[in-house]
Image (spheres, helix red, strand yellow):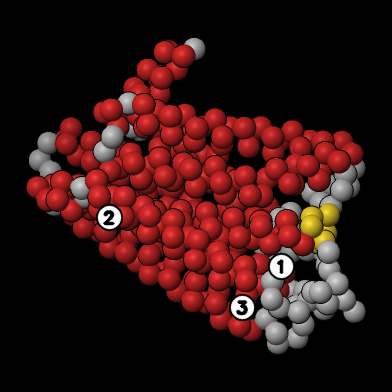
Amino acid sequence: MSNSSSITHFLLLAFADTRELQLLHFWLFLGIYLAALLGNGLIITAVACDNRLHTPMYFFLLNLSLLDMGSISATVPKSMANSFWDVRAISYVGCALQVFFFFFCGTAEFSLLTVMAYDRYVAICKPLHYGTLLGSRACVHMAAAAWVSGFLDAVLNTANTFSLPLCQGNALDQFFCEIPHILKLSCSHSYLREVRLLVVHVCLAFGCFVFIVLSYVQIFRVVMRIPSEQGCQKAFSTCLPHLAVVSLVISTGMFAYLKPPSISSPSLDLVVAVLYSVLPPAVNPLIYSMRNQELKDALWKLMTRYF
């Protein structure tokens, strides 16, 4: 039996055994990765360069795009490299870094989505107080709080996970280093403290979810009372993309971590992991730009200027 002190690397789950399917996985992930970098990079550049987008909503969107780029970069490049070179190994330190950056970006992103729900609530329900409640200093503080919460959560979970003694080998049933699969390698009962930490993490996420839901209940109550159809559509155009992103993140994450063990299988876990770790960063820019005319105009202006 091995222990954590003797483990120098972990073995990740391969997507395929044949060379053709490995290369297909490489090119598919490369396309998704480049699309995510391009989409989020365009949003960051458009918000930074267009003075009309220097508002709290777009400031938070810029931060969300940065986190999306970090989240997908934590897992996809290593999986692509393993498929291309037909290997499965990831170093012990590399695995710890994956866990850290994935938790860092994931927690910070969900915290930021909660802040963005508050931004929409104030903009629609308390428009006269918008400048006071969401001034530039307040926005910076809220964004910084989201990043710091992600950092602290990542440090705590990574330190707890990799201080556990591992006695069940080094093969992970996932294409990246994910805490639940690392816990399966730990010695009997030694993982309970990490499970308790994950429970606290889920409770905090549920609290953010309740805050988002309550915010949107108030928002929809106000929007439904707007007499003009144009005003209604404008309010929905700023809220629906955020609501769609929140729904995507929560639905895929909940299915990944709360699905019953009876339906769990390595292939299903692999598909679900792709849905919640790879899909959101790639489609978030599309969701936010689809119904947002200001952002589409800024992106078009940016592309016509440089291309």
- Residue 233 position within the rendered picture, expressed as x and y whole percent measured from the top left: 23, 36
Which one is in front, 147 or 260?
147
Give residue 302's quadrant in the image.
top left
| Image quadrant occupied by the N terminus | bottom right
Q: From the viewer's perspective, is 225 left or right of 67? A: left
Look at label 2 and name its amino acid: Tyr
- Residue 34 position within the rendered picture, expressed as x and y whole percent measured from the top left: 62, 32
Which one is in front, 198 or 270?
198
Judging by the rendered image, the residue that carries numbered circle 2 is 118
Look at label 1 and name its amino acid: His
Determine which of the numbered discs, if any, sits on residue 19 in the image. Answer: none
User: In the picture shown, does residue 295 fall above or below 193?
Assistant: above
User: In the picture shown, does residue 36 fall above or below 92?
Assistant: above
Q: From the viewer's perspective, is 296 left or right of 2? A: left
Judging by the rendered image, the residue that carries numbered circle 1 is 181
What residue is shown at x 44% (from left), y 63% (from top)? 149
Q: Secondary structure at mark 2?
A: helix
What residue is shown at x 21% (from left), y 58% (from top)? 218
Q: CA distance from mark 2 to mark 3?
A: 31 Å
Q: Earlier in the sequence, mark 2 or mark 3?
A: 2
- Residue 264 position within the rendered picture, expressed as x and y whole percent measured from the top left: 70, 66
The 10 Å Cα crowd at callout 3, few under 14, some 14 to 19, many 20 or more, is many
What residue is shown at x 26% (from left), y 58% (from top)? 215
- Residue 68 position within the rendered picture, expressed as x and y whole percent measured from the top left: 52, 45
Judging by the rendered image, the residue that carries numbered circle 3 is 194
Q: From the viewer's perspective, is 169 left or right of 268? A: right
Look at label 3 and name its amino acid: Glu
Single out the mark in the foreground, 2 or 3. Answer: 3
Q: CA distance from mark 3 to mark 1?
A: 12 Å
Residue 250 seen in render: no
Q: Secondary structure at mark 3?
A: helix
Q: Earlier in the sequence, mark 3 or mark 1?
A: 1
